[in-house]
Image: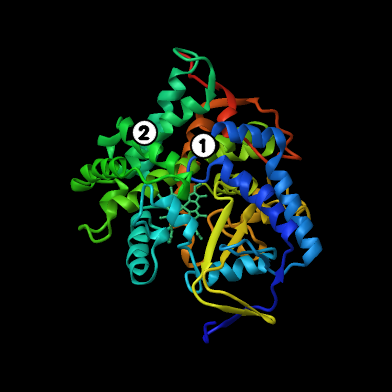
Amino acid sequence: MNARSHAIFPKVNRAGWIDTFRVITTVMAPTVAKGVIIRRPAMERLAERRGFDTSAVKQMQRLKNKYGAAPLLLPIPFRPQLLILDPADVATVLQSSPEPFAAATAEKHAALAHFEPKNVLISSGPRRAKLRPAHEHALATANRLHPYSLHFKSVVDAEFRQVLNGIGFNRPDELDWPAFSQAWYRVIRQIVLGERARNDITLTETLNELRGRANWAFAAPVDQRKLALFHRQVGGYLAEPEKHSLISRLPDGDELAPENQVAQWLFAFDAAGITVMRTLAVLACHVSCWVKAVEEATGADLDRPFTRSCLLEVLRLWPTTPVILRQLTKDIKAGGRIIARGTGVIIFAPFFHRDPALVYANRMEPSIWGRNDALPSAGLVPFSAGPIICPAHNLVPTIASLAVGTFLSAADIVLLQPSLTVGNLPGTLNHFDIRLRLTARRKEK
Ligand code: HEM
């Protein structure tokens, strides 16, 4: 036992074996099966049909009612985990990261080793201290608007106007995930790597293959050849960074293993695209929100607070990072117990985001966010919070609100599939199967 134990939680409860097994089967397994690093369409579809996400939240509520709000120790052999059940503890854990709650957990190492083994997320100590500021500078973490926002708007507009122009002409008047995501990947590549990367589909394909392996984490060997190929491909862009690309804001030199950092950016923008598609779907059936968002979209301001709040609501309702993981770097004291160093910590976001005690649990309520993008003491943390908060927590809502705006300013949108009830939104919204009908508001010739 470590002599320097810390008192962080007044109390920790211990779950019985059957309850531990239930958490594994109803909370952890479905999350992993949907694909943590790249979503699996068949599993998303199954989760939607069977209501896995709603069942997981119910299971967590049952545990909280049974054991109380203190963190719950799941005695999983070789890998004990503390399940956080109180929003106040969400804030404590995230604020007290990376010490003693390290972001670099064994599970993340196993997954990220497949495509970014030297990424900041799985770095600790002095290396994290070096890497984090590089991300924060490149992504302009502290700024509500990234200094390149105007350029990003021109990229987003150009790509999505092309999609809009094709609609009803060489394409049916529908927007589905395949059509949207191809354009979105072109946007991502240009924003991250520069215009030169616009059509580098091979790069995205290589990354997505590596992400597919990363879903299997420990269970699949790293494809070292493909990993080296991917890093070489990214390295080609890093060697001559284009003006106004995100990579142009990284410091020179190999010390940061920049390919490993950029891999995370390319990967994580996928979640932003999913959020844009879901936001369009929800706004299409939400008249009052639609009107306000269209007003912003047709204005000149790059900062669109209402659209941002809608995006945050979509991330609250369907978090793209449903589980935030931590690992104890030292023993901690909790009531009469010592929780050993190495114990995992699980924050299952949907449990807090969809707490039925919240009047707005299952509907969109943009007003809750104000100017914030994290409300940790209420457990509302789509971008996490504290020192390890997503360094793109300002950049993502900016780019995503610009993307939503390009559609809203040019087209009327009807949600064809799935059918949504705005007052009672479902636990799962499978983005792969969203279909929108767009009617471009064309000017008369
Ligand atoms: C919808 C989009 C996104 C969401 C919801 C999201 C959310 C998150 C969350 C929850 C974390 C984990 C933080 C923690 O463990 O406490 C994270 C980490 C991170 N995200 Fe994002 N993210 C998104 C997009 C992006 C994008 C587009 C980038 C880069 C361009 C990015 C860069 C990072 C990096 C570098 C980290 C690691 C931070 C660290 O370890 O210090 N994210 N993100």
User: For this rendering, which residue is in front, 375 or 411?
Assistant: 375
> What color scheme is it?
rainbow
Q: Residue at x 70, y 28 (%)?
A: 419
The kind of residue on which mark 2 rests is Glu
Circle 2 residue: 205
Residue 318, can we see it?
A: no
Q: x%, y% of residue 302?
A: 45, 45
Q: Residue furthest right?
A: 66
Mark 2 residue's CB less than 8 Å from ligand 1: no
Quadrant of the image occupied by residue 88: bottom right
The answer to whether the residues at label 1 and label 2 have Cβ atoms under 8 Å apart is no
Seen at 37% across and 30% down, the residue is 158
Of residues 27 and 120, the one drawn nearer to the viewer in this rendering: 27
Question: Could you give the CA–CA distance between mark 1 and mark 2, rounded to whole angstroms?
Answer: 25 Å
Is 417 situated left or right of 221 in this image? right
Q: Identify the image quadrant of the C terminus.
A: top left
Q: Which residue is mark 1?
A: 404
Q: Is residue 4 above or below residue 323?
A: below
Residue type at mark 1 is: Val
> Which element type, helix, strand or loop, lies under badge 2?
helix
Q: Residue furthest front?
A: 77
Position of 338 compared to 55: left or right?
left
Q: Position of residue 432 (x, y in %)?
A: 56, 30
Determine which of the numbered discs, if any, sits on residue 305 in the image. none
Compare residues 378 and 324 and report the one nearer the observer: 324
Circle 1: element type:
helix
Q: Is residue 412 above or below residue 288?
A: above
Image quadrant where residue 224 sits: top left
Q: Residue at x 58, y 42 (%)?
A: 33
Name the image quarter holding the N terminus. Answer: bottom right
Question: Where does the image place residue 238, in percent across and percent down from the top left?
Answer: 23, 47
Label 2 crowd bin: few (<14), some (14–19), many (20+), radius 10 Å: few
